[in-house]
Image: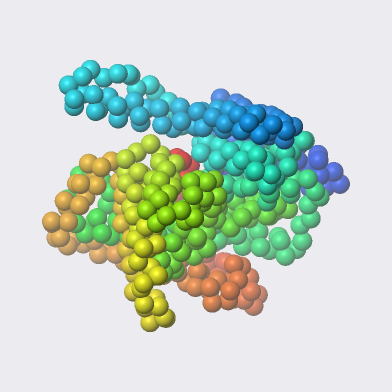
Amino acid sequence: MSFLASAFPLFLVITLAVYWLAHRHFSLQNTILLVASYVFYGWWDWRFLSLVIASTAIAYGAGLAIAATADNGRRLAILWAGNGVLLGTLFFFKYFNFFVSSANHVLVHAGFPPSGAVIEIILPIGISFYTFQAISYLIDIFRGDAEPELNPINFAVFKAFFPQLVAGPIERSGHLLKQFRQKRIVTPTDIRRALWLLCYGYFLKIGIADVAAPVVNTAFSATQPFGWWTIIGTMLFTIQIYADFHGYSTIAKGIALLFGFDLVWNFRHPYFSASISDFWHRWHISLSSWLRDYLYIPLGGNRVGRLRNYVNLMTTMMLGGLWHGANWTFLAWGTLHGVALCVNRAVGPHCPSGSMWRPAYWLLTLATVMAGWFLFRCQSLADVVGMLSALGNMEWVPAHAAALKLLLVLALQMMALELLEVVRRDRFGVLSLPAWPAAAIMAVMFLIAFATTGTRDEQFIYFQF
């Protein structure tokens, strides 16, 4: 199921009603949430629900085994075995065909017959997210940063909690799992905040991302010959992907709040960043912090020599690119960000400081991010070459003017809401306004989303990851 499905409002109302009828027994509430989460995921394809359950069973059992074993060698072996199975499953569904196709391509060009056949594999929704959540749980237990969950229901619902199951945020046991061990209380303020988050999230998705999507699809068509489509399309995709993913994360946080749970903030105004390092402290925070804590720091982080530090940055970002999918364009995207982070690490301390330089740093950062989004959106390296080649034809046609006007309208809408949060230093900035202005803003957002519902033919972008 999706937050956009026609059945979702009824599903949410029924789940909320049953959940709060059992408010005296939070353990029963957890069971209700677990059943609802399995229904939510199984609505898409019941066959792949077995993967969620298997991943849960493996992580649960491995976590107990690690905690019950005193010998560090055996604990490490259990950790590797548990995470090996989890990563092996992810590799098969997400990367098997990619590596087979790449190997066949190399062999054919070298004059040898291909080594294996590509098989038809359906990618289970959310597998990257719930796999990373399980891996971090086992590593935290091994490190002594977390205690294993003894109650299988608590752990299962932590792994399958439906608001964040299919597209994150990637929650840690130290933050979310402990919330399933205690009674939840929802205050009137929580309800107001939840309703605002739902309004904001759906506005970002329907009123901005889905409006930009058709124009972006046109711009990134392999057959389009105009250079202006490459430029305007990239800028529009920069808005689309942020509004789409931030919209999902905001809706998820609002839904969780209605049940009394607090999910982490996954974004913090990333397009206001004045360095690429700052961008990665603001964009997809649950993934960037996961890569930092479970990959970059274990590799040595910045505690090693400068050259080794650059290698660690490149390795982390290239694997972060591949996490998004089995495509050379994702690897190119990760490589670009890795290079940018290395340059930032090398040159940043020597750059002049002061507020007068911030606009220049902001523009440079935004240009780098948009170059990355161009690579991210292209379907293949051949498309990258084709769209860059189109820059040789800078003919201006009426459709470009319409696309540019749309770009400005969507950017101003999104920036206005973000600036309000920044200026008021409140993530619920609209709710901090007097009642009438706040109600008027929410009404306008609702009307814009409602008026553009007809364009909503796009699923959430991060469902494919």
Q: Is residue 112 above or below residue 376?
A: above
Residue 158: percent from left, percent from top: 68, 41
**As displayed, is residue 9 above or below residue 393?**
above
148 sits left or right of 355 in the view: right
Rendered location of residue 275, percent (x, y): 41, 66
Answer with left or right where residue 405 lies relative to residue 135.
Answer: left
**Closest to the observer, 374 or 95:** 95
Q: Judge whether 79 appears above or below 133 on screen.
A: above
Q: Position of residue 73 (x, y in %)?
A: 63, 31
Residue at 52 percent across and 63 percent down: it is: 268
The colour scheme applied to this rendered structure is rainbow
| Residue depicted at x 58% and y 28% | 81
Give 31 or 98, whichever is nearer the viewer. 98
From the viewer's perspective, tell me whether residue 314 is left or right of residue 81: left
**In which image quadrant can residue 367 be found?**
bottom left
**Which residue corresponds to the image point at 40% horizontal and 78% vertical from the top-left?**
353
Image quadrant of residue 411? bottom left
Query: In front here: 310 or 276?
Result: 310
